[in-house]
Amino acid sequence: MKKSFVFFGVLLGLFLIFIGIFNSDKKQKLSDDIVALVDNHPILKSDLDLALKALSMNKDNQITSEQIQLVKDRLIDEQLLLQRGIDLDLHQTSNPIRKLIVNSMIDSILSENNDFLIDDKNLKKFYNDNISFFLPSKELRLKLIFLKFRSQEEDEKRLDTIRERLINGDDFDIVSREEGDEFLPKIPDTFLPERKLKDYIDPNLVKNAFNLEDGQITSEIETDKGYSFLYLVESEKGEPLPFESMRDKIRGEYKRRKDEEALLNYIEWLRKKYDIIYNETIDE
Protein backbone atom coordinates (compact mmCIF):
# COMPACT_ATOMS: atom_id res chain seq x y z
CA MET A 1 0.00 0.00 0.00
CA LYS A 2 2.81 2.34 0.91
CA LYS A 3 4.67 1.44 -2.27
CA SER A 4 1.54 2.11 -4.32
CA PHE A 5 1.16 5.48 -2.70
CA VAL A 6 4.79 6.38 -3.42
CA PHE A 7 4.44 5.20 -7.03
CA PHE A 8 1.28 7.28 -7.47
CA GLY A 9 3.10 10.29 -6.05
CA VAL A 10 5.96 9.84 -8.50
CA LEU A 11 3.49 9.61 -11.42
CA LEU A 12 1.66 12.68 -10.20
CA GLY A 13 4.96 14.56 -9.95
CA LEU A 14 5.99 13.55 -13.45
CA PHE A 15 2.56 14.55 -14.75
CA LEU A 16 2.81 17.97 -13.12
CA ILE A 17 6.31 18.45 -14.50
CA PHE A 18 5.06 17.49 -17.97
CA ILE A 19 2.16 19.93 -17.67
CA GLY A 20 4.55 22.61 -16.49
CA ILE A 21 6.87 22.03 -19.45
CA PHE A 22 3.93 22.02 -21.86
CA ASN A 23 2.53 25.24 -20.44
CA SER A 24 6.01 26.76 -20.36
CA ASP A 25 6.41 25.90 -24.05
CA LYS A 26 3.09 27.57 -24.81
CA LYS A 27 4.12 30.64 -22.87
CA GLN A 28 7.37 30.76 -24.81
CA LYS A 29 5.39 30.66 -28.05
CA LEU A 30 3.13 33.45 -26.79
CA SER A 31 5.85 36.09 -26.79
CA ASP A 32 5.22 39.80 -26.35
CA ASP A 33 4.61 40.32 -30.07
CA ILE A 34 1.95 37.59 -30.30
CA VAL A 35 -1.60 38.08 -29.03
CA ALA A 36 -2.86 34.53 -29.60
CA LEU A 37 -2.16 31.31 -31.48
CA VAL A 38 -4.77 29.77 -33.78
CA ASP A 39 -3.71 26.25 -34.64
CA ASN A 40 -0.09 27.39 -34.23
CA HIS A 41 -0.61 30.43 -36.46
CA PRO A 42 0.13 33.67 -34.59
CA ILE A 43 -2.13 36.70 -34.27
CA LEU A 44 0.44 39.48 -34.08
CA LYS A 45 0.24 42.37 -31.67
CA SER A 46 1.01 44.71 -34.57
CA ASP A 47 -2.25 43.57 -36.23
CA LEU A 48 -4.15 44.22 -33.02
CA ASP A 49 -2.55 47.67 -32.64
CA LEU A 50 -3.47 48.54 -36.22
CA ALA A 51 -7.08 47.43 -35.73
CA LEU A 52 -7.35 49.36 -32.46
CA LYS A 53 -5.89 52.47 -34.08
CA ALA A 54 -8.54 52.30 -36.79
CA LEU A 55 -11.22 51.82 -34.14
CA SER A 56 -9.98 54.76 -32.04
CA MET A 57 -10.36 57.11 -35.01
CA ASN A 58 -14.13 56.60 -34.83
CA LYS A 59 -14.36 56.85 -31.03
CA ASP A 60 -14.62 59.96 -28.90
CA ASN A 61 -13.94 58.10 -25.66
CA GLN A 62 -11.07 55.81 -24.69
CA ILE A 63 -11.36 52.24 -25.95
CA THR A 64 -12.53 49.84 -23.23
CA SER A 65 -11.10 46.42 -22.36
CA GLU A 66 -14.32 44.85 -23.69
CA GLN A 67 -13.75 46.50 -27.06
CA ILE A 68 -10.14 45.32 -27.08
CA GLN A 69 -11.30 41.76 -26.44
CA LEU A 70 -13.90 42.10 -29.20
CA VAL A 71 -11.18 43.14 -31.66
CA LYS A 72 -9.03 40.19 -30.56
CA ASP A 73 -11.97 37.86 -31.15
CA ARG A 74 -12.53 39.31 -34.62
CA LEU A 75 -8.87 38.76 -35.54
CA ILE A 76 -9.11 35.17 -34.28
CA ASP A 77 -12.34 34.63 -36.26
CA GLU A 78 -10.60 35.96 -39.35
CA GLN A 79 -7.69 33.56 -38.85
CA LEU A 80 -10.09 30.65 -38.31
CA LEU A 81 -11.88 31.42 -41.56
CA LEU A 82 -8.55 31.80 -43.35
CA GLN A 83 -7.34 28.43 -42.05
CA ARG A 84 -10.59 26.76 -43.04
CA GLY A 85 -10.35 28.28 -46.50
CA ILE A 86 -6.85 26.82 -46.86
CA ASP A 87 -8.10 23.42 -45.61
CA LEU A 88 -10.83 23.53 -48.26
CA ASP A 89 -8.20 24.40 -50.91
CA LEU A 90 -10.02 27.63 -51.83
CA HIS A 91 -6.73 29.25 -52.82
CA GLN A 92 -6.58 26.70 -55.66
CA THR A 93 -10.25 26.30 -56.56
CA SER A 94 -11.52 29.89 -56.30
CA ASN A 95 -10.33 32.22 -59.06
CA PRO A 96 -10.99 35.48 -57.12
CA ILE A 97 -8.97 34.16 -54.16
CA ARG A 98 -6.15 32.99 -56.44
CA LYS A 99 -6.00 36.42 -58.07
CA LEU A 100 -6.05 38.13 -54.68
CA ILE A 101 -3.13 36.02 -53.46
CA VAL A 102 -1.16 36.55 -56.68
CA ASN A 103 -1.74 40.31 -56.54
CA SER A 104 -0.75 40.37 -52.87
CA MET A 105 2.46 38.52 -53.73
CA ILE A 106 3.24 41.00 -56.50
CA ASP A 107 2.59 43.92 -54.13
CA SER A 108 4.90 42.32 -51.57
CA ILE A 109 7.70 41.80 -54.11
CA LEU A 110 7.42 45.35 -55.40
CA SER A 111 7.27 46.86 -51.91
CA GLU A 112 10.58 45.15 -51.09
CA ASN A 113 12.01 46.48 -54.34
CA ASN A 114 11.01 50.03 -53.35
CA ASP A 115 13.48 50.02 -50.50
CA PHE A 116 16.37 51.02 -52.77
CA LEU A 117 17.43 54.65 -52.86
CA ILE A 118 16.84 56.46 -56.16
CA ASP A 119 19.38 59.26 -56.33
CA ASP A 120 19.89 61.89 -59.00
CA LYS A 121 23.12 60.29 -60.19
CA ASN A 122 21.30 57.08 -61.17
CA LEU A 123 18.37 59.01 -62.64
CA LYS A 124 20.60 61.22 -64.80
CA LYS A 125 22.47 58.21 -66.16
CA PHE A 126 19.15 56.47 -66.87
CA TYR A 127 17.88 59.62 -68.63
CA ASN A 128 20.99 59.92 -70.83
CA ASP A 129 20.97 56.19 -71.66
CA ASN A 130 17.30 56.34 -72.68
CA ILE A 131 17.10 59.87 -74.06
CA SER A 132 15.10 58.84 -77.15
CA PHE A 133 12.36 57.40 -74.91
CA PHE A 134 11.89 60.74 -73.14
CA LEU A 135 11.95 62.98 -76.20
CA PRO A 136 8.65 64.78 -76.90
CA SER A 137 6.56 62.95 -79.48
CA LYS A 138 7.16 63.50 -83.18
CA GLU A 139 5.11 66.32 -84.71
CA LEU A 140 4.02 66.68 -88.34
CA ARG A 141 3.21 69.58 -90.61
CA LEU A 142 0.65 67.91 -92.84
CA LYS A 143 -1.51 68.87 -95.83
CA LEU A 144 -4.40 67.02 -97.44
CA ILE A 145 -6.42 66.82 -100.67
CA PHE A 146 -9.91 65.44 -100.14
CA LEU A 147 -12.44 64.01 -102.62
CA LYS A 148 -16.00 63.11 -101.67
CA PHE A 149 -17.49 59.89 -102.99
CA ARG A 150 -19.53 60.41 -106.15
CA SER A 151 -20.07 57.94 -109.00
CA GLN A 152 -17.35 55.40 -109.70
CA GLU A 153 -16.73 56.85 -113.15
CA GLU A 154 -16.44 60.42 -111.89
CA ASP A 155 -14.26 59.37 -108.93
CA GLU A 156 -11.80 57.57 -111.23
CA LYS A 157 -11.61 60.55 -113.57
CA ARG A 158 -10.92 63.03 -110.76
CA LEU A 159 -8.37 60.73 -109.11
CA ASP A 160 -6.49 60.32 -112.41
CA THR A 161 -6.35 64.11 -112.84
CA ILE A 162 -4.96 64.65 -109.30
CA ARG A 163 -2.40 61.85 -109.66
CA GLU A 164 -1.19 63.28 -112.98
CA ARG A 165 -0.87 66.84 -111.67
CA LEU A 166 0.98 65.76 -108.53
CA ILE A 167 3.37 63.57 -110.55
CA ASN A 168 4.04 66.55 -112.82
CA GLY A 169 5.03 68.57 -109.75
CA ASP A 170 2.09 70.96 -109.55
CA ASP A 171 1.80 72.84 -106.28
CA PHE A 172 -0.09 70.72 -103.73
CA ASP A 173 -2.16 73.64 -102.43
CA ILE A 174 -3.23 74.66 -105.93
CA VAL A 175 -4.22 71.09 -106.85
CA SER A 176 -6.17 70.81 -103.60
CA ARG A 177 -7.99 74.08 -104.26
CA GLU A 178 -8.76 73.36 -107.93
CA GLU A 179 -9.44 69.62 -107.87
CA GLY A 180 -10.42 68.73 -104.32
CA ASP A 181 -13.48 69.15 -102.13
CA GLU A 182 -13.67 71.21 -98.98
CA PHE A 183 -12.61 69.26 -95.90
CA LEU A 184 -13.57 70.45 -92.43
CA PRO A 185 -12.12 71.04 -89.99
CA LYS A 186 -9.06 72.22 -91.88
CA ILE A 187 -5.67 71.00 -90.66
CA PRO A 188 -3.72 73.99 -89.24
CA ASP A 189 -0.53 74.75 -91.16
CA THR A 190 1.71 74.06 -88.17
CA PHE A 191 3.43 71.17 -86.41
CA LEU A 192 0.94 68.89 -84.65
CA PRO A 193 1.46 65.77 -82.48
CA GLU A 194 -0.38 62.52 -83.20
CA ARG A 195 -3.12 63.05 -80.63
CA LYS A 196 -3.90 66.51 -82.07
CA LEU A 197 -3.95 65.34 -85.69
CA LYS A 198 -6.66 62.83 -84.75
CA ASP A 199 -8.90 65.81 -83.98
CA TYR A 200 -8.81 66.73 -87.67
CA ILE A 201 -8.47 63.57 -89.75
CA ASP A 202 -9.29 59.86 -89.65
CA PRO A 203 -6.99 57.84 -87.32
CA ASN A 204 -6.05 55.61 -90.25
CA LEU A 205 -4.80 58.67 -92.14
CA VAL A 206 -2.79 59.73 -89.09
CA LYS A 207 -1.18 56.28 -88.97
CA ASN A 208 -0.23 56.59 -92.64
CA ALA A 209 1.12 60.10 -92.12
CA PHE A 210 3.56 58.97 -89.43
CA ASN A 211 5.03 56.42 -91.85
CA LEU A 212 5.90 59.10 -94.44
CA GLU A 213 9.24 60.76 -95.07
CA ASP A 214 9.48 64.55 -95.17
CA GLY A 215 8.26 65.84 -98.55
CA GLN A 216 6.51 62.58 -99.45
CA ILE A 217 3.00 62.53 -101.01
CA THR A 218 0.77 59.48 -100.85
CA SER A 219 -1.48 58.06 -103.52
CA GLU A 220 -5.18 58.19 -102.68
CA ILE A 221 -6.22 56.60 -99.37
CA GLU A 222 -9.84 55.55 -99.05
CA THR A 223 -11.78 56.22 -95.84
CA ASP A 224 -15.48 56.07 -95.02
CA LYS A 225 -15.86 59.73 -96.11
CA GLY A 226 -13.99 59.70 -99.42
CA TYR A 227 -10.45 59.72 -100.82
CA SER A 228 -7.48 61.58 -99.34
CA PHE A 229 -3.99 62.44 -100.60
CA LEU A 230 -1.53 63.27 -97.81
CA TYR A 231 1.52 65.50 -98.09
CA LEU A 232 4.03 65.49 -95.23
CA VAL A 233 5.62 68.92 -95.58
CA GLU A 234 8.07 68.27 -92.75
CA SER A 235 8.35 66.66 -89.33
CA GLU A 236 10.27 67.41 -86.20
CA LYS A 237 11.30 65.45 -83.15
CA GLY A 238 11.18 67.37 -79.91
CA GLU A 239 14.44 68.51 -78.34
CA PRO A 240 15.53 66.88 -75.05
CA LEU A 241 14.06 68.68 -72.06
CA PRO A 242 16.14 69.69 -69.00
CA PHE A 243 16.55 66.96 -66.40
CA GLU A 244 14.94 69.04 -63.66
CA SER A 245 11.70 69.50 -65.62
CA MET A 246 11.57 65.76 -66.38
CA ARG A 247 12.59 64.41 -62.97
CA ASP A 248 9.17 63.00 -61.99
CA LYS A 249 8.65 61.30 -65.35
CA ILE A 250 12.20 59.88 -65.33
CA ARG A 251 11.80 58.64 -61.75
CA GLY A 252 8.46 57.00 -62.59
CA GLU A 253 9.85 55.16 -65.62
CA TYR A 254 13.01 54.17 -63.74
CA LYS A 255 10.92 52.70 -60.92
CA ARG A 256 8.56 50.95 -63.36
CA ARG A 257 11.46 49.20 -65.09
CA LYS A 258 13.09 48.26 -61.77
CA ASP A 259 9.79 46.81 -60.56
CA GLU A 260 9.41 44.84 -63.78
CA GLU A 261 12.98 43.54 -63.44
CA ALA A 262 12.44 42.58 -59.79
CA LEU A 263 9.23 40.70 -60.60
CA LEU A 264 10.83 38.80 -63.50
CA ASN A 265 13.83 37.88 -61.34
CA TYR A 266 11.57 36.66 -58.54
CA ILE A 267 9.50 34.52 -60.91
CA GLU A 268 12.70 33.10 -62.40
CA TRP A 269 13.83 32.18 -58.87
CA LEU A 270 10.46 30.52 -58.20
CA ARG A 271 10.78 28.49 -61.42
CA LYS A 272 14.10 27.13 -60.17
CA LYS A 273 12.83 26.55 -56.65
CA TYR A 274 9.72 24.53 -57.53
CA ASP A 275 9.30 21.56 -59.83
CA ILE A 276 7.28 22.25 -62.98
CA ILE A 277 6.09 19.29 -65.03
CA TYR A 278 4.35 19.95 -68.34
CA ASN A 279 1.72 17.61 -69.71
CA GLU A 280 3.00 17.29 -73.26
CA THR A 281 -0.20 15.59 -74.45
CA ILE A 282 -2.24 18.79 -73.96
CA ASP A 283 -0.72 20.41 -77.06
CA GLU A 284 -1.19 17.35 -79.26
Image: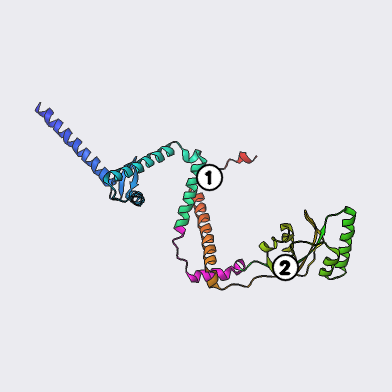
Direction from residue 12 to residue 165 in the image, left or right:
right
- Could you give the CA–CA distance between mark 1 and mark 2, rounded to whole angstroms? 59 Å
Q: Report the predominant secondary structure element of the magenta stretch.
A: helix
Quarter occupied by the N terminus: top left
Q: Which badge, 1 or 2, is on the more N-terminal residue?
A: 2
Q: Amino acid at mark 2?
A: Pro
CA neighbours of label 1 inside 10 A, class few (<14), some (14 to 19), many (20+)? few
Residue 210 pos. (x, y %): 72, 63
Q: Which mark is residue 114?
A: none
Indicate yes or no whether the magenta region holds residue 232: no
Numbered range of the magenta stretch: 112-134
Q: Which is more toward the observer, 14 or 101?
A: 101
Residue 282 pos. (x, y %): 61, 39
Look at 90% across and 59% down and name the residue there.
157
Q: Which is more toward the observer, 72 or 254?
A: 72
Task: State whether residue 274 appears in this view.
Answer: no
Identify the residue position indicated by label 1 in the image: 276
Look at 61% across and 66% down and name the residue there.
133
CA neighbours of label 2 inside 10 A, class few (<14), some (14 to 19), many (20+)? few
Q: In the displayed image of the protein, which residue is found farthest to the left?
A: 2
Q: Which mark is residue 188?
A: 2
Residue 245 pos. (x, y %): 54, 71
Which quarter of the figure has residue 139?
bottom right
Task: State whether residue 8 appears in this view.
Answer: yes
Q: Is residue 60 above or below residue 277?
A: below
Q: Amino acid at mark 1?
A: Ile
Direction from residue 58 to residue 279 in the image, left or right:
right
